[in-house]
Amino acid sequence: MSGASMTGFGRSTFEWGRAEYHIEIRSLNGKSLDLQIKAAEPWAVLDNVAYKVLQRHLLRGKISLQVWAAPKATTHSRSPIHTEEKPPLIINTAVLNSLIQQWHDWSATEKASGQEPWVDGALLGRLVAAHPMIFQKAFPEEAAMDSANAFDSPDNNEEAAGAYLTALEAAVQDCLKHRLAEGKAITETLLQYLEEIRSNTVAIQKIDSVKEPLIRKKIEAFWNEWNSQPEHEGVPALRPDPLRLEQELLYYLEKKDIAEELVRLKQHLAFAREILSSPGEQGRKLGFVAQEIGRELNTIGSKVSDFEIQRLVVLSKEVLEKIKEQSLNLL
């Protein structure tokens, strides 16, 4: 994977039984894999499998997976104008007759034992309505279909698990497309930032290349002026040691020399561009290189006293902060 962002969004749907299920994946920046799964029943038993799928494809980031159900609109062949989402229910007369018969049998038993049973028609109605099998679907073929599609656990049902995992893979691929599209835009922006720093580095090197002759010229002018001073009231003028002066000059130029820093800075910039063009994870590598670029810029800024060079260093450090910020978005 090349130039992928950690920010992405993926979505897919699949049907099972009488419901349509939606899968949604959201991915944000994160230092490691932080995965949260909220799956509606009965798909929660496959959370471990879903975790492995997301871990294998998305690698890193703060990722949330949600699975929820929505009613599926259905039509029935018996009635062309029947478009209700839920099929109508009718009373299961077999269950109703059985409950009433049990009520009468209990009442007769109570009377036979010499006790007067508490007979309340309203109570009987509430008991009947609370029975889980008192209602049945109007169309028997639909009930048979739901019974065939019903399952206790999708990990024991290969067809159900296959439908879920296929939809999950589709959502993951959709999320990866978003990641790659945003990663491409981030990479182009980062390359522009690196080019700005490279341009500033070239300008710094150009200014620094004429610095040493100017310093030598100033010191020579000072040397000549010092040696031209006449004696004052019989006291001879001070004459500095030429060898010691040359040593001090070399020490000063070496202390202010930034040639090595400029070489390393160019190498770091080239390495950063190489990282952005290579496959695999890029964000962390680019973050480490950005730290090295910052060290070289800080050293250059502390060594030189030229205002224009310091200005270019400040501008480069400002661009570097943008690179650090954008590198956090890359995988």
Image: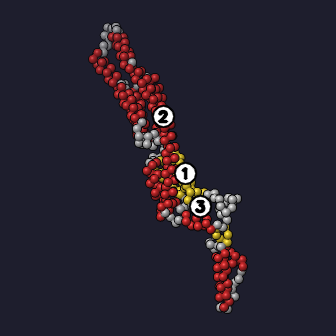
The residue at 65%/88% (across/down) is: 109
Mark 2 sits on what residue?
A: 188
Q: Nearer the viewer, residue 115 or 49?
A: 49
The answer to whether mark 1 and mark 3 are in CB contact below 8 A is no
Question: How would you rate the neighbour count of disc 2 (Cα within 10 Å): few for under 14, some for 14-19, many for 20 or more?
Answer: few
Mark 1 sits on what residue?
A: 12
Question: How would you rate the neighbour count of disc 1 (Cα within 10 Å): few for under 14, some for 14-19, many for 20 or more?
Answer: some
Q: Is residue 220 above or below residue 64?
A: above
The residue at 65%/85% (across/down) is: 105
Asked which secondary structure carries label 3, the reply is loop
What is the spatial separation of the Cα atoms under label 1 and label 3, in whole angstroms?
Answer: 17 Å
Residue 18: assigned label: 3
Q: Amino acid at mark 1?
A: Ser
Seen from this angle, which residue lies furthest left?
243
The residue at 51%/50% (across/down) is: 170
Camera-nearest label, 2 or 3 = 3
The residue at 43%/28% (across/down) is: 198
Q: Amino acid at mark 2?
A: Glu
The answer to whether mark 2 and mark 3 are in CB contact below 8 A is no
Camera-nearest label, 2 or 1 = 1
What is the spatial separation of the Cα atoms under label 2 and label 1, in whole angstroms?
Answer: 30 Å
Q: Amino acid at mark 3?
A: Arg
Q: Is residue 230 above or below residue 269?
A: above
Residue 48 drawn at (x, y percent): 46, 58
